[in-house]
Image (cartoon, rainbow, N blue to C red):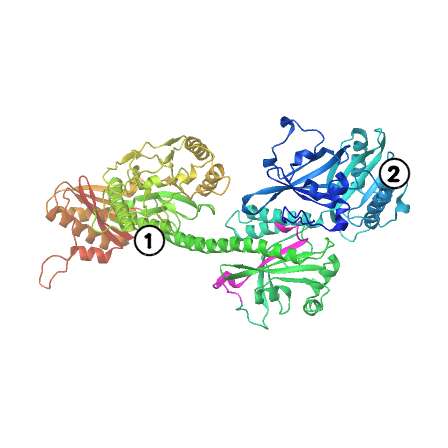
Amino acid sequence: MEQYPVGDPEQGLTSNEADAAFTALATVDQRGIVTGWNTGFEQLLGYLPVEILGRPAVSLLADEPAASALPLFSELPRWHGTLPLRHRDGHRLEVRVIAHRRALEGGTHDWVLVSAVAGTQPGPGDDALLRRGLLDSPCCPTALLDTSLRYRRCNQAAEVAMDLSDEDMRGLRLRDVMLGDPVAEEVEWRMLRTLETGEPQYLERHARAPGETRDHAWSIHLFRLEDQDGRVLGVASTSHDMTEQYWARKRLQLIAEASTRIGSTLDVRRTAEELAAVAVPDLADFLCVDLLTSLDDLPEQPPGTFRAGTPLALRRVAHRSVYPGTPEAVVAVDEVDQYPEGSPSAESLRSGQAVLYQVTERAIPDWLAKDSLRSSRIREFGFHSAMAVPLTARGTTLGVVVFARHRHPDPFQQDDLVLAEELAARAAVCIDNALRYTRERRTAVTLQRSLLPQSLPEQAAVEVASRYLPAGARAGVGGDWFDVIPLSGARVALVVGDVVGHGIHASATMGRLRTAVRTLADIDLPPDELLTHLDDLVARLATETDGAVGVPPRHTKTEAWGTADSDGEGTGEGTGDVGATCLYAVYDPVSRRCTLARAGHPLPALVRPDGTVELLDLPAGPPLGLGGLPFESFETELPEGSLLALYTDGLIESRDSDLDAGISRLCQALSGPAASLETLCDTVLEALLPQRPADDVALLIARSHALDADHVATWDVTPHPSAVAKARKDTVEQLKAWGQADATFVTELVVSELVTNAIRYGEPPIQLRLILDRSLICEVSDASSTAPHMRRARTYDEGGRGLLLVAQLTQRWGTRQSSAGKTIWAEQDTDPGL
């Protein structure tokens, strides 16, 4: 563009004399005074510079315009139009003028007016110029077609694209030139529409023209041609090669798509598959993701630590192809393959840099010669270009991803390599997150499973079956647990609990609570008292987690359980919150009575022998950890063969359905017939958890058994030393009746010691009870709450050795308290054949 100098207004404008013959140029300052005048304007209007400089510009107008017709020049960067000007000799001229607003130093401005001296009428050589400019244009393929859509003329760019000359195509239709091409048929249909309606048409298509060696992205414009009278002459087609812009948009789309599709889960294989789904087929025809096998067992490998000369072991985690079944792959998913030195994958990992190569490169056959299977697949599918990009995240090398082309005719370019590196970088971070999560989750699951019962103990009171399902990947490992604890007197305790939150913290808390429950159960605390002690423990754990020192364990936590949502996914992990729910039940097969208490836990379900299902209406105790609130026990009789189902809230609660619906499905599943308790557990889980649960699920189902009355013998003991002999006699006779004569000596000694202690130190009434179950149990009860304890007797002491003898002669012994006093019991194993 010509630079118009500011110059000195008094000296006028400087201009090349040759240019001045064709372009009239003048300047007008912001006051409207002419400050510049070249020879072009002198020729156009006849005024010399000395005659016009310093005069108002409006004096040149043939007609003074109305003020309403003038635009706001102060707001315009440029104005153009036709001005009626007066020639020096007085005749009127209609002059087309372009006025440019120009900023000057000091914050002022002026206007530069330009006009064509030679006028705007076509010259004698314009037609030839137009034809040659159109026909010889090498830029945009352009063609002119008549109303029959037959070629009349086309330019040089169209000849190159079609690989035909103008004479070859003249008189033919586009579908004749590109026979069978669906793009040609669509373009002709658009041409017809343009001829009929006069509306220009625009379309973008990705296709290969006959004269091209690779696909191009074309933007095609179609418009109707008419003469001055409006008669339709034909249609014009211009095409623009938008291939670079097309691939740039595709790369941006792939990057945007990768940011949303890669890393939707914390699963390594799923993340690798998402990378493959994004890249194939838009970038590559085949893709594989291989991870270092060292990640299975050893710490991560930083870049540059791979030793030269040794093959690399890589595990295939995902691959994808444009062909169904991925027939190009030589390694199956989950298989390990060795990549020799010199192979692109190995070199990419050793250098830590992406590698772009052609299969025809000289270095490729060297390592392919050692792998006949890969060589045959490369020849079979025609691989011609590939990229190997290392997967590196947070300074850790994870593996390599290989992009390859065989169906796409174009080899990979440097821009493709940059895109591949971007996709691999995004995927590497997601894979690294998944690997770290997998390690942490595996640790948490291992910890959790080690804290759960490895096998349920043998006991005759109930038949049990259990299920434990960890939460899905989003929720993480939780703190659900269950337990079956044999108690004295052939009784059994059933426990189900749930710790708020997820992760290792919840699992560790669960282990501490389970240990505490077993310890408290070992001293035969009633359910309500056991939950009270457990509540104190949870409050104390919460205080320790908060870092408080010297603060009483109660009243220090408020609504710890409130951090859990409806699905049991708490936020206690990492927040210091400690809370739990628990259901504790004790079943006595002798009396068939079951005593239960709960702390914020879902109600248990009871299935009676006739198949009716009900929820036991236990008092709603508060969740553990709140402190200061009481727990109440509930006692009921269980007919023999009844089922008691204990579970955590993950079984019945979900985001997709409310609590009542979950309880209804549970009751319906429990009411159906089942071949075994194991089958019933599976039926319940299938009915309530069609998919992997969002929260941990613990399920414990127990079928009650009643101890035969013939296996229980009870005697009231007179509180007098003479009653000891009678107790021994009754015991011996009962053992003979049960066929347990081999246990007579030990049992007679145990009865003698326990009854003697009850008469000497206890309070009436005193009762002796023998129970024959999996073991022989001897129990002596009295009304005193004072518990006995073993002590070391001196050499000359007359007593103090009774409980020591009982402990030495029996397998287990202990004391349990009751509202009526205490019971001292001792167990000895019986002959399993009896």
Q: Is residue 23 above or below residue 444?
A: above
The mark found on residue 179 in the picture is none
> Does residue 185 appear left or right of residue 558 in this picture?
right
Which residue position is annotated with label 2? 150
Which residue is found at the position 70% from the left and 32% from the top?
A: 61
Q: Nearer the viewer, residue 93 or 513?
A: 93
Q: Amino acid at mark 2?
A: Arg
Q: Are marks 2 and 1 in contact (CB under 8 Å)?
A: no
Question: Is 287 inside the magenta-drawn segment?
Answer: yes
Residue 113 percent across, percent down from the top left: 68, 41
> Does residue 252 appear left or right of residue 121 in this picture?
left
Which of the 4 image quadrants contains residue 494? top left
Q: Nearer the viewer, mark 2 or mark 1?
A: 2
Residue 281 shows in this picture: no
Tell me which segment is drawn in magenta: 277-303
The mark found on residue 831 in the picture is 1
Please, what secondary structure does the residue beneath circle 1 have? loop
Mark before the other along the chain sequence, 2 or 1: 2
> Does residue 31 appear left or right of residue 480 in this picture?
right
How dense is the environment of label 1, judged by Cα within 10 Å: few (below 14), some, or many (20 and up)? few
Seen from this angle, which residue lies furthest front? 50
Which of the 4 image quadrants contains residue 38? top right
